[in-house]
Image (cartoon, rainbow, N blue to C red):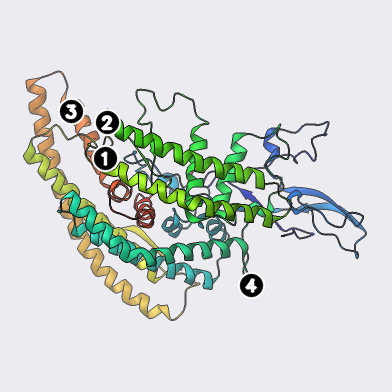
Amino acid sequence: MKSLSPLPLLLSAFVLSAGAADQTSAPAPSSSSDTVRETPRSYTDHTSTIQYRVDTNFPNYHPYYGSHIGSPLMNSYSGTIQIERRRIFLPPTPPALGEPLRGDKTGQTLASLTLPPTLRSYIYEIFYAPLSALMFSEDLSRKRRETLDAYLAARTQAVTALRAKLDSLAGADPDTRSRELTAFASTQAAALASLESTAESIRDNLVNGSLFQSGVDWNNLRDWRLGDDTRWESQADEIKVITGSVFFQEGLSTPQRLLLRELAMELSDSLRSPDAEIALNAPGPYLYFSPAAARIRLPANLPPELDAKLDEYRAKKTVLKKELRDALYRGDRAFWESTRINALKSLAAKQAPEFAAIEQLAEEIRVGLSAFPNPARPAALPVPPALLKRIAAYIGEKAAWQKAMVEKQSALRALFPDDRIEFSRSEGRPALQIVASRRSKPELKTKREAAQAELATFNASQRKSYDALVKEKELVSAEILQIAGSLASRAPVKSIDQLLVEFGHSLGQQENWLRYADYETAVLQPGLSPEQRRLLFGAALEKLDLPLTER
């Protein structure tokens, strides 16, 4: 059983929104018989200082309530300790398939708390939260960084191989594509199982630490538990525990952790107005599908047999979520930590076949949905086919240019993990630059100089492509303006400006949709294994460039 130090120097403050401001409140009620009631917020939030008293008449204090194991060398002591609160950040919530993305990054850049951009590579990882705290406090040892770099390199290799296979089957018919992907899944099975095992080992190390490495364990350091005082409990408190369990609770399998992340999202949805998703201007409702935390819109008028499978899928998934939620609530106040861990390990073994059955059912649903148009896909532009083809070519070239920039940035970050690899403006055009870190290895200097020379050539090539895109954009815009003028003159119900706004909106929707290509494949392409879906979905979230911080 873990115990707290007699003079704790760190008290974790779990932040439920990335970059949220520090929170302070009055001390929580010490028992249900208190005559002075505190605010509900103080039930789960910590103060920056804490009053304590140690008395050897009670040598064994329960660690869940913020005490410690007494010592015969200490009669009693009382005083005030200043608590340093470690910030723990949560990953951004995955958007639904096709959901509009924030295009302006100024808010992120000027956020009061800024996280390292390399953290974006781990958005879907089960160790994101403890890693965020160690990165933010610059308490990540070289050994840990090397372990993360090796893991990221292996994961990138697996994603690259999967994407290459998908690209090679782009022109195949649906049956051939599904059959070939199913065969390829077996060749990647061992490597992906090893990757997920390594991710769990990294999570364990970041949470529990080692002899010479500090750990971040919110679940162990908080001094409240569900059920301590049910009069102050709320659904928000359960969301905190469920979210914390994703990253900090021992005894869970990877599918369970990711399903808990989805459950936390679902419970957060329930805090909104009940009619939020059925308003006529709402994009939802969404189906929480597979992999966990992915959401999609369903086509209308599905056949009864497919509707029945969807109902069965929802029901089976709800049972798993309820079992997990109940187990966490029951075990949250267990006196021995091993009691809670063993109960969750037993549940993980029990639920493993159910997870496999649900994935099989999801595959049958995917095959059924493939016969229907995706309702999230934006409508075609109201322009002639020739211009549509030209616009599609421009969007494809622009996406390829952007992909080259992002992939180059990722490759350089893998080579120089301690350096800043960031976008800048050179000669009025976007470019990449390497800003060396004082903490990087001296032997990397020569390697960095060679990379910077090669980067200059890359930037020059990208500038030429950028100029060509700018020229094509102006030509396409002029043609769209001409078409808008022609339409307005023939049917002057709408002005040229109104038509241009509509065209611009439609173009924006098309570009937004292209960014979801990997997301759509991970969720809806038949033939992939659950491990491949999780792998590709994580890579898809990274490509979406979601904000890591908020103001």
CA–CA distance between discs 3 and 2? 38 Å
Whole-percent x, y for residue 197 in the image: 48, 64
CA–CA distance between discs 1 and 4? 53 Å
Q: Nearer the viewer, mark 4 or mark 2?
A: 2
Label 1: state its secondary structure.
helix
Residue ID for mark 3:
499
For marks 3 and 2 on the same chain, the one whose residue lies earlier in the sequence: 2
Disc on res. 303: 2
Residue ID for mark 4:
212
CA–CA distance between discs 4 and 2? 60 Å
- Compared with residue 333, is residue 6 higher up or lower down, i.e. above or below? below
Proximity of marks 1 and 2: CB atoms separated by less than 8 Å: yes
Mark 2 nearby-residue class (10 Å; few <14, some 14–19, many ≥20): few
> Camera-side residue: 183 or 195?
183
Proximity of marks 3 and 1: CB atoms separated by less than 8 Å: no
Q: Is residue 22 shown to the viewer in this render? A: no
Mark 4 nearby-residue class (10 Å; few <14, some 14–19, many ≥20): few
Disc on res. 62: none
Left or right position of 99 against 325: left
Whole-percent x, y for residue 224 in the image: 71, 45
Residue ID for mark 1:
368
User: What type is the residue that disc 2 sits on?
Assistant: Pro
User: What type is the residue that disc 1 sits on?
Assistant: Gly
User: What type is the residue that disc 3 sits on?
Assistant: Leu
Left or right position of 316 against 306: right
Q: Nearer the viewer, mark 3 or mark 1?
A: 1
User: What type is the residue that disc 4 sits on?
Assistant: Phe
